[in-house]
Amino acid sequence: MVRTGREPGGSWEFALGSPHPRLRPGVLSYRGVRLAMDRPRRRLEAPVGAATLFLGFDQPVRISRAGRAPDTLVSVYCGPTTTPAVGEHGGRLSGVEVMLAPWAAFTLFGTPQYELANRTVDPDALPHALDRRVGELSGALAALPSWEARFRLLDEVFARWWDAGTPCSARLVRAWSELVRTGGAMPVRRLAEEVGWSVRHLENRFREQIGLGPKAAARVLRLQRARRLLAAGHGQAETAATCGYYDQAHLSGEFKAMTGCTPGEFTTARRRPPAAAPPGDRMDGEATSLVLI
């Protein structure tokens, strides 16, 4: 599906693609992006229960995160995170954004995910990654004539990387799936019992193949569910109770810590029409982003 638009400030195009069934549920989605705006653009990106690989075609994006120096990159890998980031560019941006289950990123890149948690890196600089393969892939994608052809190439390349990659633990995938299914509500001890591991072993495997410990991952998934409910019009008290927060104040504190704004500020900003182009949330059906300018 391709959506396009043109307005006084420029033009935009978004293309959504589904990875080949053999790659799912590890490779979650493809999203092609092409922006040609007449002014810079900034977006706040909230933590999500996924890793993000952006394969840029030309212009760089500058990514800022509290406590770290900004990164300016054409292609970007962002592992699991508990903190928000702000991405900005000069108004022109094109590339393909790939959303990955964190354990799938472990298999595709062969890198312990704890080395990448709460970081933004050039994917060609990933430890243990094959030299230049992401840069070469970005160039090949840019040269193709359509989003459909680009998504087909991604299917082919990811299938090869998958076959050559480090297999993740089937029990880890099961534990992650349960945590996602319950919106981060399953207690860690019960999760460990479900897959037949000790809590300590579960924590170690999560750090290696997810990047965050199970408690931190649950926080991200719980807040992701809360953002989705708030964006759909649910009240804060109802959302707090549904998602397992102690009370509305607990929800507000977690929201501020992981997005940089309160639930009210986030939902109000989501309702404002963007100055240029749709918000373009990274995950379909999720409230992941705010357009700042």
Image: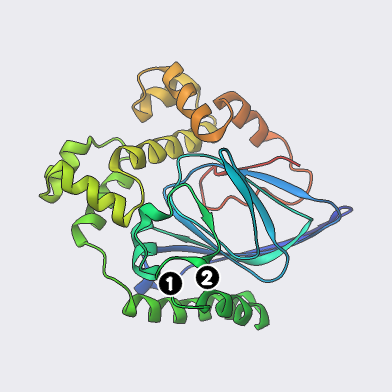
| Dot 2 or dot 1, earlier in sequence | 2
Q: Quick check: marks 2 and 1 in contact, CB under 8 Å?
A: yes
**Drawn side of residue 183 relative to residue 232, left or right:** left
Identify the residue at horizontal 33%, vertical 74% (top origin).
165
Q: Is residue 232 visible?
A: no
**Drawn side of residue 272 relative to residue 71, left or right:** right
Q: Quadrant of residue 97?
A: bottom right
Q: Label 2 amino acid?
A: Asp
Which of the labelled discs sits on residue 97, or is there none? none
Query: Which residue is nearer to you in this view: 94 or 10?
Result: 94
**Drawn side of residue 123 relative to residue 40, left or right:** left
Q: Quadrant of residue 101?
A: bottom left
For mark 1, what is the residue? 129
> Quarter of the image containing the C terminus?
top right
Callout 2 secondary element? helix
Q: Residues within 10 Å of mark 1 (few under 14, many from 20)?
A: some
Q: Label 1 amino acid?
A: Ala
Question: Vertically, is 140 above or below 269?
Answer: below
Question: Vertically, is 264 above or below 86?
Answer: above
Return the x and y of residue 84 as percentages of the image width and height. 55, 40
Return the x and y of residue 37 as percentages of the image width and height. 82, 57
Question: Vertically, is 246 above or below 189?
Answer: above
Q: Is residue 59 visible?
A: yes
